[in-house]
Image (cartoon, rainbow, N blue to C red):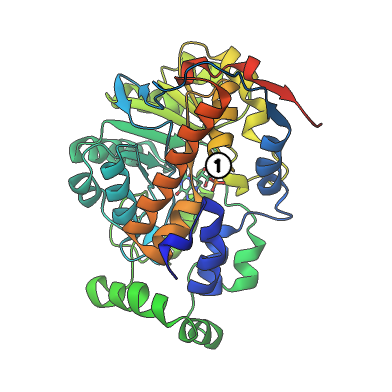
């Protein structure tokens, strides 16, 4: 397929469906149970409509945003996505390089199959997302390694006390361990580009992919049981663990997966620098409200920290709506990984360009020159 035919972020998914084997596609595109949160994330944006201003001279407009003292070229970045290297050849590197070239932030996942030291070498301004191991000694070891690698920003994802119920993964045979099966072999065989470009190259270069960064023992096969065991040992994590990390980690600390205003307030109280309001792209508790819906209350509850959002952001207009409702910044997940899978780094660069182009055009049509002017007055409720 030709990149020039991809006109918006939603165009990547159907191409990815044809490119990736079914279990891998399902892992990226899917959510949990009835996919209620996944739909809700998209729907929430349609409940608000713009009330544009006219004749405002928008010739000096800029979508630049300053986050923690660093100016970025756009109000969005790349969300952390685990196992990206199963989707795209060295996927996290494609994502992080494209983000760096476009001057937007990229968050690497703690469940990456690529070592954090390689990511930071490719993009010295990448952020690191961690899932916390249950025991404090390993929490500290992880934090120290992230610091030693040179990351300045650490995110803790806190919406994953246990593994979610991803029925689609079971149905598609995306299991951990990913057992070789006839079905998988067939599915790979009818998708030879993925089989050659991603899977075979990966096997030749690295052998079986491994989790390289997270709580899993170094070198644990991607499919190792201890990952699951570690997940189940996390359900006792609590605010004291956040405090422990805050004491140990000198860099910027962001809590990802906050939905309740009180939890945002508590995050601020514990010394976090920011929160990402997120339901994990609808991949954890199904039926969770959309982040957009709770955003205004969260912003009110934590006025001293940076409030960001992810989930269902696909358009410049989505970004402007989130900003109008109080988000300082947003992150985009799935479309970027579909883009990386089918087109590699060039696809991610194209996706970023498309979204920047939309934000720029939408700002002009809305009648604003800067994102500071994008306030609740720009919106009315159009539907309940
Ligand atoms: C994710 N997400 C995620 N979040 C996180 O904190 N750590 C992780 O390792 C992952 N892994 C992951 C894998 C895949 C394939 C997807 C699609 C998502 C969640 C991600 O960071 C983000 O919250 C959502 O993807 C945002 O929603 P959209 O943009 O995908 O709708």
Q: Is residue 223 above or below residue 363?
A: below
Q: Is residue 94 above or below residue 285?
A: below
Give coordinates of residue 321: x percent, y percent: 60, 29
Q: Nearer the viewer, residue 333 or 273?
A: 333
Give coordinates of residue 174: x percent, y percent: 54, 69
Q: Which residue reaches farthest right? A: 384
Disc 1 under 8 Å from ligand 1? The reply is: no
Query: At 45% from the left edge and 19% from the top edge, which residue is drawn?
Result: 369
Whether residue 74 is visible, yes or no, is yes
Give coordinates of residue 228: x percent, y percent: 49, 57
Give coordinates of residue 349: x percent, y percent: 35, 51
Query: At 26% from the left edge and 44% from the top edge, which residue is drawn?
Result: 101
Residue with the mark numbered 1: 315
Whether residue 175 is visible, yes or no, is no
Left or right, residue 151 beside residue 369: left
Instruction: Mark 1: give few (<14), some (14-19) or many (20+) Cα within 10 Å.
Output: many
- Quadrant assignment for the N terminus: bottom left
Q: How many marks?
A: 1
Q: Secondary structure at mark 1?
A: loop
Left or right, residue 343 beside residue 12: left
Left or right, residue 54 beside residue 157: right
Left or right, residue 268 beside residue 120: right
- Quadrant assignment for the C terminus: top right
Picture quadrant where residue 342 is located: bottom left
């Amino acid at each position: 397929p030709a990149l020039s035919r991809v006109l918006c972020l939603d165009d990547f998914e159907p191409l990815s469906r044809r490119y990736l084997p079914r279990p891998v596609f399902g892992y990226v595109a899917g959510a949990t149970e009835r996919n209620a949160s996944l739909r809700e994330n998209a729907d929430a944006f349609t409940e608000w409509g713009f009330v544009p201003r006219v004749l405002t001279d928008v010739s000096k407009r800029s979508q630049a945003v300053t986050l923690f003292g660093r100016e970025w070229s756009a109000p969005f970045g790349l969300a952390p996505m685990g196992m990206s290297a199963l989707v795209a050849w060295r996927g996290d590197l494609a994502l992080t390089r494209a983000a760096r070239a476009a001057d937007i932030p990229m968050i690497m996942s703690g469940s990456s199959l690529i070592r954090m030291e390689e990511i930071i070498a490719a993009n010295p301004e990448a952020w690191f997302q961690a899932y916390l191991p249950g025991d404090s000694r390993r929490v500290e070891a992880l934090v120290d390694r992230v610091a030693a690698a040179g990351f300045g920003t650490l995110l803790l994802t806190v919406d994953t006390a246990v593994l979610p119920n991803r029925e689609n993964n079971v149905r598609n045979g995306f299991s951990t361990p990913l057992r070789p099966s006839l079905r998988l072999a067939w599915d790979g065989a009818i998708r030879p580009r993925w089989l050659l470009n991603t899977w075979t190259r990966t096997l030749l270069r690295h052998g079986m992919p491994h989790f390289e960064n997270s709580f899993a023992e170094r070198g644990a096969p991607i499919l190792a049981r201890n990952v699951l065991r570690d997940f189940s040992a996390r359900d006792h994590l609590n605010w004291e663990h956040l405090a422990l990390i805050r004491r140990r980690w000198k860099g910027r600390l962001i809590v990802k997966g906050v939905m309740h205003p009180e939890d945002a307030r508590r995050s601020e109280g514990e010394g976090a620098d920011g929160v990402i309001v997120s339901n994990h792209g609808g991949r954890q508790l199904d039926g969770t409200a959309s982040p957009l819906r709770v955003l205004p209350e969260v912003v009110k509850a934590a006025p001293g920290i940076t409030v960001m959002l992810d989930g269902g952001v696909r358009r410049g207009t989505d970004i402007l709506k989130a900003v109008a409702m109080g988000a300082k910044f947003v992150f985009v997940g799935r479309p970027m990984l579909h883009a990386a899978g089918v087109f590699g780094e060039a696809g991610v660069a194209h996706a970023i360009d498309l979204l920047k182009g939309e934000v720029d055009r939408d700002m002009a049509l809305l009648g604003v020159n800067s994102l500071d002017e994008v306030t609740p007055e720009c919106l009315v409720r159009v539907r309940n």
